[in-house]
Image (tube, rainbow, N blue to C red):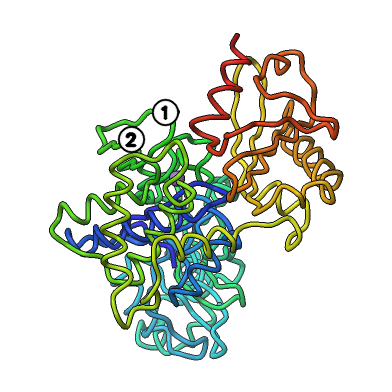
Amino acid sequence: MIKSTDTYVIGHINPDTDAIASAMGYAWLLRERDNASVIAARAGHLNPQTTWVLEQLEMEPPQYLPDASPRFAEIAHRYDTATPDAPLRDVWAIASITGGVAPVVNPDGTPYGLITVISLFNFLKEKVGAHTRNEETRIKDIMDIPCAEACDTAVPQFQAKTRIRDVLSRILYEERSEFWVVDEDGRYQGVCRQRDALNPPRLNIIMVDHNEPAQALGALNEANLIEILDHHRLGNPPTNAPIRFTVDIVGSTCTLVCEHIAEAGLSAPPPLAGLLLAGLLSDTLILTSPTTTPRDHKAAERLRRWAFVGGAPLAGETVQSFGEKLLQAGAGLSSRTPDEIVSADVKLYEAGGLKFGVGQVEVTSLNELAEHQQALMQGLIHLRDSKGLDFMVLMVTDVVRKTSRLLLTDRLPQLDQLPYPPLEDGTLRAEGVVSRKKQLLPTILGALSG
Ligand SMILES: [Mn+2]
């Protein structure tokens, strides 16, 4: 259950291993060091590499949080309930405590009706009459009547997981000011008040491994952004208050998390250390990508020491052996559909008046490209059209030979000056290019602005 009193550490959409691992690692550090109520989350589905590594380490994936818009669960008050045959005095007691509302719930858990100030007034009006001709009716007798008779049975119901803003206009135009909150089976979860729906509590969000709203979970502007920990180019949203902001030139966000853990005088438990090492080795292609810095080597050394101890899931591995299995687990064009491959690790950008996406897929040999090239191009065109982009690029990266080939949906004149020679099969040869953020993206941005 998503709760606004918690803080969520979350990586980018289309999460890769660094995004998942850094969120889990940083959430752990904040709990361990600060005793904070912090939970790791993910903004999308796991890729095959991350799935593989979590299985190896016997770890659960973080909680799925596709958007930050507050939901009814956030504002549901779980008031005490009565059954429809209970005497009115029972619900009167509840309503006296809650400020005029009492839920009447069927024995199967579904709502029967709400006792509200208005429903009570209407009920008394009926019993006593407009001209108090029944004024001798005693309160004691009224209190013996089953509460079902005093209920409003037409109160709208909202599911706990429904976003409040999606039905806000309905709530605003409704005469009533209290509503049911129910679960997926229509069972009582609580009562919400109109005033709470107008000003719901915001989720606290810490962004890791990204800082651009376009790469973030949905409705980021409906959350409190409280911190950013990242290693990408800047494109961060404005905030109302100062926030802790760390963007540094290292090969992975897991490197930054590892440094913070060490600075706190702590050591990550072996499975978490293995996961952080996986994020680091995945982003740096086992410390060979041009994004790799001495700090990444130092972090890998530290994580290796924590992760490969006797009795741990990765006992007996080396950085190289673990890294190779990891890259192998995410690689290949055969195990997924072309649509899955092109959308699994895609990032969207805007520059020079053009919207575009850059996807990346890893292979252990470029020989397998020819067989899948046409299908991948179809997948890229689908994605371009469904996202309303001007063009799509797919980086097919050979993680063994550390080089890439590029598939480009559109031969725009601006892209003619890219320094990658076209080959006979229509792909571009990007010799030695393995990093989207440090090599390919700056080159494309340069071409579009030039
Ligand atoms: Mn990263």
Q: Quadrant for ligand 1?
A: top left
Instruction: Check disc 1 and report its element: helix, strand or loop.
Output: loop
Residue 369 placed where, x, y %? 77, 47
In this rendering, the answer to whether 424 lies above or below 316 is above
Give the percent coordinates (x, y) of residue 130.
50, 64
| Along the viewing direction, whichever of 335 and 424 lies nearer the viewer | 424
Which amino acid type is marked by label 1? Answer: Leu
Which of the 4 image quarters holds residue 424? top right
State whether residue 176 is above or below residue 130: above
- Residue 195 lies left or right of residue 110; in this view the side is left
Q: State if disc 2 and disc 1 touch (CB < 8 Å).
A: yes
Q: Quadrant of the N terminus?
A: bottom left
Residue 7 lies, with reference to residue 105, above or below; the image says above
What residue would you read off at disc 1?
A: 234
* Residue 247 circle label: 2
* Residue placed furthest toward the left: 265
**Secondary element at tag 2:** strand
Q: Is mark 1 within 8 Å of ligand 1?
A: no
Answer with the quarter of the image where residue 333 lies: bottom right
Point out residue 440 in the picture as x, y percentages from the top left corner. 58, 29
The kind of residue tagged 2 is Val
Q: Nearer the viewer, residue 211 or 198?
A: 211
Give the Cα separation between the discs numbered 1 and 2: 8 Å
Q: From this viewpoint, which residue is outermost toward the front? A: 401
In this orientation, which residue lies closer to the viewer: 339 or 374? 374
Who comes first in sequence, dot 1 or dot 2? 1
x%, y% of residue 186? 60, 75
Residue at 64%, 35% in the rendered image: 358
